[in-house]
Image: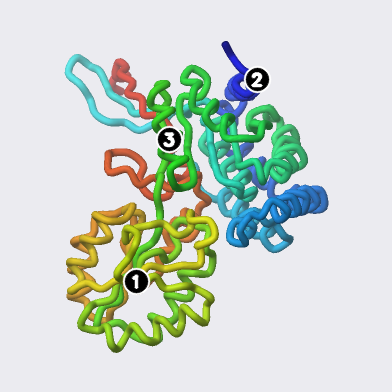
Amino acid sequence: MVDEVDSIVIAAAQAARAAAGSIAAASPQTVDATLRAVADRLGAEAGAVLAANQADLTAAAQAGMPAAMQDRLRLDPARLGAMAEQLRVLAAAPHPSRRRFVRELPGGLRVEERLRPVGVIGVNFEARPNVVVDVASQLLKSGNAGVLRTGSAALASAAALLDSVIAPALAGTGLHPDAIQLVRAAGHESARALVRQPRLIPLVIIRGSGETTRLLAGEAAAHGVRTLAHADGGGVLYLDRAADPDLVHRIITDSLDRLGVCNRLNLLLIQQEARDALLPPTLTLLDKLGIAAALPPHAHERGHEWAMDTGHEATVTIDFVAGPAEAARVADQETSGLAASILTEDPAAAAEFLDAYTGTGAFWNAPTRLLDGFKLLGLPETGINVDRVPGPRGPVTFGDLVLRQFVTTPAPPAG
């Protein structure tokens, strides 16, 4: 028996599916014009969007939402402006070729590779209203329709962005306004319903971290729905004995500018030989930043993700390792494998670390916060995939949201 929440998700998926052909058939020029229209409407409709967001923020504060989570929920004129700028950058990005000659076959045949839209893609994400626009723009640029489901705390903001900004922009450029749908049902059951519709929503991008993401990915697999997801995050920073103290100060500070994101500094490893030189100023800096240092012996795993530990987000785990190889091993085997960075002025140490670490993003003298589609690739992302299997890995952008098809045809007559 289909319950009420399933019915809401199915209705949204059916509407998106009916509109998907409009997006798949749209010319690159029309798609890019739509993205620019969304950017323009973010400014024109800022009052309605910010009013809805304020209602979400008030309810979140009354419910006791931690400050780091409220920061992710918050919109303001500057953030709307940044969202609009990202849309314009995306609109200017070239569309990849959808057809590529592969080879000639015996018997007068030729093989061509074609890239086709998935159709309808589901996206489940935390209570971050800016993601509504980020994800919708990626889906449109890739030729797909979508069904979006956000955390209940952001539902009013998400609805305002869809109803006042995205849908009118689609209609204004001649595309079907139903192509991007929002699941307008609160509660985790709506997320579970999203991953149980293989015929309507064959692929779901699951953003966020923690046990909820793992359970959703498992639920999707049980129903034959493919997912792009990462259940755990947390950046690793290794301070080598040859690290520049000024750089250490700057990178740690930059790595903790936002505490509720997956690529923030989570585990800080210090070379044992440099403990006396590097630990005291590091502790002083963390204290100045309002960050608690979890020193050994630990009552938790070294890779414990503080961003998802409500009430303890302002924490960094610190431990000590013999050198770059051990730091890379810890980052590989005891954390999510999202991102790790080495701070050192010794190229040999950097090479040892970068060659040994096999996680999704590896950095030298740079913060793991760079593992982000816009910061790394100059494009908004739909999410980050950390799977150790073939396929999109790292920031997933519009170019990844396609299906590969091989087409074999008779070769054209010579001459």
Q: Using residue 89 as the reference point, say whether residue 392 is left or right of it.
A: left
Work out which residue is located at the far top of the displayed protein and give it: 1
Q: Label 3, label 2: how many angstroms apart (C-alpha)?
A: 21 Å
> Residue 116 falls in which quadrant of the image?
top left
Label 3: how many Cα within 10 Å (few below 14, some 14–19, many 20+): few
Considering only order in the chain, which callout, 2 or 1, is on the residue closer to the N terminus?
2
**Gap between marks 1 and 2 measured at Cα:** 47 Å
Visible in this render: residue 229? yes
Of residues 65 and 152, which is closer to you in this image?
65
Q: Residue at x 39, y 23 (%)?
A: 222
Q: Check contact, mark 1 vs mark 2: CB within 8 A.
A: no
The numbered dot on residue 4 is 2
Looking at the picture, does residue 241 appear above or below residue 235? Answer: below
Q: Which residue is mark 1?
A: 318
Can residue 98 be seen at all in this image of the molecule? no
The quarter of the picture where the N terminus appears is top right
Q: Residue 275 location, x and y as percent? A: 27, 83
Residue 292 relative to residue 11: left or right: left
- The C terminus lies in quadrant: top left
Q: Where does the image place residue 91, in percent across and percent down from the top left? A: 59, 48
| Marked residue nearer the N-terminal end (3 or 1) | 3
Q: Provide the secondary structure element on which disc 3 rests.
A: helix
In the rendered image, residue 159, in percent from the top left (x then y), is placed at 72, 39
Q: CA distance from mark 3 to mark 1?
A: 29 Å
- Give amino acid for label 3: Leu
Residue 405: x and y, percent?
36, 25
- Scheme of image coloration: rainbow
Is the residue marked by circle 2 packed among few (<14), some (14-19), or many (20+) residues within 10 Å? Answer: few
Residue under circle 3? Answer: 215
Identity of the residue drawn at 51% across and 67% down: 314
Name the residue: 73% across, 61% down.
77
Disc 1 is placed on an element classified as strand
